[in-house]
Image: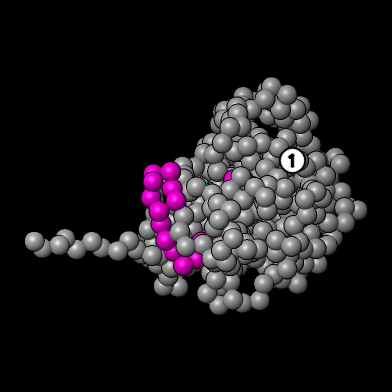
Amino acid sequence: MRLKKVSKPKTYDVLVVGAGVFGAWTAFQLARRGQSVLLLDAYGPGNSRASSGGESRIIRMGYGADELYTRWAMRSLVQWKELFAETMGLPVLFHETGVLWLGSKDYARLNEMTAVLTRCKVPFESLSGSAIARRYPQFDSQDLSSGILETDSGVLMGRRAVSEVTDSALSLGAEYRQAQVTPPGATDSRNSRLASISTNNGEKISAGQFVFACGAWLGTIFPEILGPRIFPSRQEVFFFGVPPGDSQFSARSLPTWLIQSDEVYGMPDLESRGFKIAFDSHGERVDPDTQSRVVSAASVEHVREYVAKRFPALANAPIVETRVCQYENTSNGDFLIDRHPEMNNVWFAGGGSGHGFKHGPAIGEYVAQQILDGGPAEMRFALASKATEQKRAVY
Ligand SMILES: Cc1cc2nc3c(=O)[nH]c(=O)nc-3n(C[C@H](O)[C@H](O)[C@H](O)COP(=O)(O)OP(=O)(O)OC[C@H]3O[C@@H](n4cnc5c(N)ncnc54)[C@H](O)[C@@H]3O)c2cc1C
């Protein structure tokens, strides 16, 4: 009798759990460096429960005095554009709307930002209160006496961009499977290395390195270590229908904007989805699997009140779309990109904290470097720097 040859299951160089923007770019950068990569996601790349599942995400260079993130955003924008140009012929998933920061003249952050943007050679214009009122009559801008317009920044089309990055990783040889990974158990963490993970489809998958890029789920996958260090918060987003035939809210007339003193930001009417507006203040703590994706009546009232005051022409505009998502905050807003403290081939990549999307390319590059080259680690991303109480410092 001839014995049937049983092929040995494949051992991947790297298994990446989570196909949000962090995981997709990590898979892409690793595949580009010749690694055999498997990317897994419970619900799909850029799915509607994920933080990366929104329609649109701002890519801005301004981070106040925080030059680290300015430089990462600059490097990332180049790579986003390159990827879209390579795969789609044009950077169609990036809208160069410009990004307008608004505040009062004595708002320190704008002055700090001016210094960093100048040093980093980011193109921008400084605007006085009268210039803001003249150029952007859409705003009631009486209290806004100072502005910075990042002319080359704009908006990435979120979930579609994640899908594009995933496809690009696959074209470089990475594989993708839809499955939920079972959290590694206590026995696994007693060993210094993880050999394999199990999925809810009953599969056991082996790899040399494991990257958990699981956004707001990181705390449930590693409850002891990350449960108290990742703070998922509910965030609600609104799209207002612009008046018929009115182009003052189109990207030709209105840039993407942020008013940090009001903890609010918004975008022009992109792809005819409506004028987007959202509050950046952290909502209640939520579970990404079970939180309601329906906006609350109180938030509708709050946003209507704000819009009527700040954008009088939209006072009676209908809300044409809403989204409910979550930030996956660390204690201060710095990312978490580090090794598991016990299993030295297990990595965390998360803590995007409401500002991580734009940085996807640089994050993937950094994770790949850490795994393959063991380069110098950024201490701000270290697990050891993550506190168990929130004190937001990065915006
Ligand atoms: C409303 C809102 C507005 C934002 N605006 C901006 C912005 O303008 N600019 C900006 O730069 N950033 C912004 N952000 C932040 C940015 O979107 C996030 O930081 C970023 O998307 C986080 O990506 P991620 O890959 O870490 O997480 P996610 O996108 O949440 O991805 C995690 C993935 O892991 C998967 N997963 C979880 N557990 C498992 C498991 N056990 N097995 C398999 N798969 C699993 C999930 O299905 C999910 O797809 C915003 C966020 C929100 C919510």
Q: Is residue 36 left or right of residue 266?
A: left
Q: Position of residue 24 (x, y in %)?
A: 49, 56
**Taking the image as drawn, is residue 89 in sight?**
no
Residue at 55% over, 43% down: 50
Q: Relative to 118, is 247 above or below?
A: above
Q: Is residue 283 left or right of residue 361?
A: right
- Is 209 one of the magenta-colored residues? yes
Residue at 61% over, 45% down: 220
Q: Type of residue at label 1?
A: His
Q: Position of residue 329 (x, y in %)?
A: 70, 48
Relative to the observer, which residue lies in front, 80 or 372?
A: 372
Residue at 62% over, 55% down: 350
Relative to the observer, which residue lies in front, 217 or 103?
A: 217
Relative to the observer, which residue lies in front, 326 or 13?
A: 13
- Is 174 one of the magenta-colored residues? no
Residue at 37% over, 58% down: 175
Q: Is mark 1 within 8 Å of ligand 1?
A: no
| Disc 1: which residue | 282
- The segment highlighted magenta reads 198-218
Q: Relative to 322, is 26 above or below?
A: below
Q: Residue furthest left?
A: 1
